[in-house]
Image (tube, helix red, strand yellow):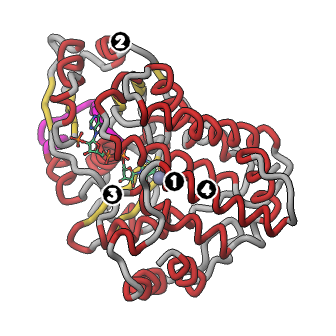
Amino acid sequence: MQNFEFFNPVNVVFGRDQIQKLNKLVPADTKIMLAYGGGSIFNNGVYDQVIAALPGFNLIEFGGIEPNPKYETLMKAVDIVKKDKIGFILAVGGGSVLDGVKFIAAAALWEEGDPWNFLTNRRLTVAKAVPLGTVLTLPATGSEMNGGSVVTRVSTQEKLAFMSNAVLPRFSILDPTVVFSLPEKQVANGIVDAFVHVIEQYLTYPVNSPIQDRFAESILITLVEEGPKVLANRNDYDAAANFMWAATMALNGLIGVGVPQDWATHMIGHELTAFHNIDHARTLAIVLPGIMQIKRDNKREKLLQYGERVWGINSGTADARIEATIRKTVECFESFGIPTKLSAYGIGADFIQVVCKRFTDRGFKGIGERGDLTVEQIAEVLTLQL
Ligand code: NZQ
Ligand code: ZN
């Protein structure tokens, strides 16, 4: 196992009727920005619960944070936070609202020019941010329990991430009943996003880390077992609860400590969203099978372990087992209604060079757990998925 530090102070408040605890979690002595997305919280009662839980609090609302939150929109909120001296931001929504709020919180205290720079320049560190808390309405990203945020800039068609402990939520309320109002597409996206988060911290090479491996496998199996129950019956509280906790555990840092990680699928996927606005999880379902094929030698031992422990594939030659494992993964995504080929999204071969050029232009030095995925191999991955 590799050396590591693990720091995760997020106060997770999980279960039914927990939104009413907001008045004990949000500071009462400061101005609060209540930030949300396109309005789903008005239709499912979450907004009403939040307002009822915060009587007498000094609230300013900022709505309209889009899926794949936009820098251009978020900067409007940054102005308000500065002008109105907001002391706490409450994010109520899915990963996009949470990520958007993390950006707003960091950008409002950023003193070194355009905040976009801390997304483009990995050497810049976000050291401070306005404190924030969350009420999660969509299990998927893990944003509720991590310090990551992904922001899109419309003017340049870029989608970039930053990480900072300064934007770790002070608390996150996880009430599984929010799942009841989710459209099928968002449930499917959430299952696949969480699944791929686990895969990118697990499907690398062995470093003798049985705790991380078995936690990772338990999350994958839970998603495979509970996901279909949520899709079949949105009001199944137990399935919703297990799905929600699985998605949080998939990207709160725990399974990624001390092990190699491979975020190539996410990095390539972000380009598919930046140029074609494909839902985040769907981009992952397209890219991952290609990565598994092209990097099957790097990932050989873990592919065999994953196939055996998650899918029960334990007979045949190693190559045949790896083929069956990749096939099972694709079938799983497709069974949730998520296509894994670019053609299903109307994208042809021309686009592959656009993606490759972008990586080259950024001074690309290789990605993946060994840093050896080349631009040529990115083209091969996408060609396999045409
Ligand atoms: O905007 P509203 O009206 O709220 O509607 C949203 C949105 O249209 C709707 N929704 C959310 N909760 C709902 C609901 N509809 C009905 N009932 C509810 N309870 O769902 C739609 C999608 O929401 P969004 O927040 O965009 O989805 P998701 O949670 O999948 O977030 C995706 C974003 O997170 C980033 C992605 O790149 C993408 O921008 N990620 C963030 C990560 C992180 N911070 O660690 C890691 C991930 O890998 C990912 O990159
Ligand atoms: Zn993701």
Q: Nearer the viewer, residue 262 or 349?
A: 349
- Residue at mark 2: 17
Q: Is mark 3 within 8 Å of ligand 1?
A: yes
Dot 2 or dot 4: first in sequence order is 2
Judge left or right: residue 275 versus residue 57: right
Residue where numbered disc 4 is placed: 329
Residue that label 3 marks: 151
User: What secondary structure is marked by label 2?
Assistant: loop
The amino acid type, in three-letter code, at marker 2 is: Asp
Question: What amino acid is labelled 1 in the image?
Answer: Phe
Q: Residues within 10 Å of mark 4 (few under 14, many from 20)?
A: some
Tell me which image quadrant ligand 1 sits in.
top left
**Disc number at residue 381?**
none
Q: Is disc 1's CB within 8 Å of ligand 2?
A: no
Instruction: Please state the horizontal and vertical placement of residue 197, each as a whole percent of the image.
Output: 56, 50
* Residue 229 located left or right of residue 319: left
Q: Label 4's element? A: helix
The secondary element bearing badge 1 is classed as helix
Give the label, 2 or 4, closer to the camera.
4
Residue 333 has which mark?
1
Residue 2 appears in the rendering: no
Q: How far is disc 2 from disc 4 in space, using C-alphas?
A: 36 Å
Along the polypeptide, which appears first: circle 3 or circle 1? 3
The earlier-in-sequence mark between 3 and 2 is 2
Q: Residue at x 40, y 50 (%)?
A: 149
Indicate whether residue 82 is drawn in magenta.
Answer: yes
User: Measuring 40% from the left and 71% from the top, which residue is drawn there?
Assistant: 271
Where residue 285 sits in the image (x, y, percent)? 49, 60
Secondary structure beneath disc 3?
A: strand
